[in-house]
């Protein structure tokens, strides 16, 4: 039981490049989330998916797109990376809604130069 | 979603009890209070959750007064390994699909 896995762990992009961050959970959870965390800051919600087939914007959705591929997988895409998107990205999942216990992945450290 | 306010940072010493208070003046009737812990370079980890009065588990206690406008996370006899950021969150179990983490309280335990 791996919990929540994220790939890649580290990534360096040049401005304007695109990439997709992958997240998968094996706990049969309904809801999944993408957060970003800038140095010394708290977590900010980018997008979330309350159930398979649905996605909604969080606090900071601009510059990102998401896909809930199936119940297990929730990907985050940067179409044209900008230096302001340099951050650590965490994926999380929960069985029920956001208030119930969220399980976090190890994070992806992204640097955009 | 109810807004929460907590201290930006706190220092304490090993072996002491640490209390971190969170203010949530506009908490709604169906809102629950949840605390997470985050170590450097890791994702947050759920610590404890409660609705009213007192909740205790093997890691911490959560004290919620009758008016529920604040809550206090209590960590007994802290050690250096308790140095982390602690987040207080408030949300409706039945209604809120998302939850806001905020900046948390950076707790630094000194030897």
Image: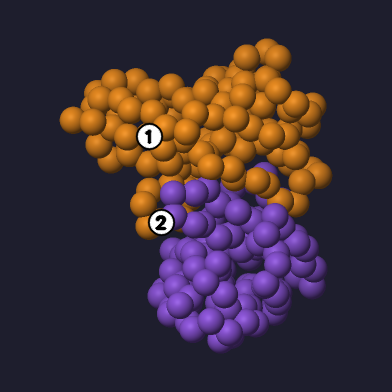
Chain colours: A purple, B orange
Residue positioned 70% across, 75% down in the render:
A65
User: Residue B34: where, in percent of width, then height?
Assistant: 59, 36
Residue at 52%, 62% in the rendered image: A90
* Quarter assignment of residue B1: top right
Q: Is residue A109 left or right of residue A30?
A: left
Q: Mark 2: which secondary structure?
A: loop
Q: Earlier in the sequence, mark 2 or mark 1?
A: 2
Chain under callout 2: B
Q: Position of residue B66 (x, y in %)?
A: 68, 13
Q: Which class describes the residues within 10 Å of circle 1: few (<14), some (14-19), or many (20+)? A: many
**Could you tell me which chain the residue with mark 1 belongs to?**
B
Q: Quadrant of residue A53?
A: bottom right
**Residue A19 shown left or right of residue A1 in the figure:** right
Identify the residue at the far bottom of this view: A17
Disc 2 designates what residue?
Answer: B42
| Residue neighbourhood size for the residue with mark 2, other residues' Cα within 10 Å, grouped as few (<14), some (14–19), many (≥20) | some
| Residue for point 51% across, 57% down | A37
Residue A73 visible in the displayed image: no
Query: Is residue A106 visible in this depiction of the protein?
Result: yes
């Amino acid at each position: 039981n791996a919990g929540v896995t994220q790939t890649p762990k580290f990534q360096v992009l040049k401005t304007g490049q695109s990439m997709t961050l992958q997240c998968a959970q094996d706990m049969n959870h309904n809801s999944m989330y993408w957060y970003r965390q800038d140095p010394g800051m708290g977590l900010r919600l980018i997008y979330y998916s309350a159930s398979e087939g649905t996605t909604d914007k969080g606090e900071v959705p601009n510059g990102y797109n998401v896909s809930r591929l199936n119940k297990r997988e929730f990907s985050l895409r940067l179409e044209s990376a900008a230096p302001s998107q340099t951050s650590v990205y965490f994926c999380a999942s929960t069985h029920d809604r956001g208030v119930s216990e969220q399980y976090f992945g190890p994070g992806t450290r992204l640097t955009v130069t | 979603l109810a807004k929460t306010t907590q201290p930006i940072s706190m220092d304490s010493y090993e072996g002491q009890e640490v209390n971190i208070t969170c203010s949530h003046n506009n908490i709604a009737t169906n809102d629950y209070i949840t605390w997470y812990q985050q170590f450097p370079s890791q994702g947050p980890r759920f610590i404890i959750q409660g609705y009213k009065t007192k909740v205790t588990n093997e890691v911490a206690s959560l004290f919620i007064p009758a008016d529920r406008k604040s809550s206090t996370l209590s960590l007994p006899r802290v050690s250096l390994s308790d140095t982390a950021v602690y987040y207080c969150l408030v949300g409706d179990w039945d209604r809120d699909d998302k939850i806001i983490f905020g900046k948390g309280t950076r707790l630094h335990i000194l030897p």
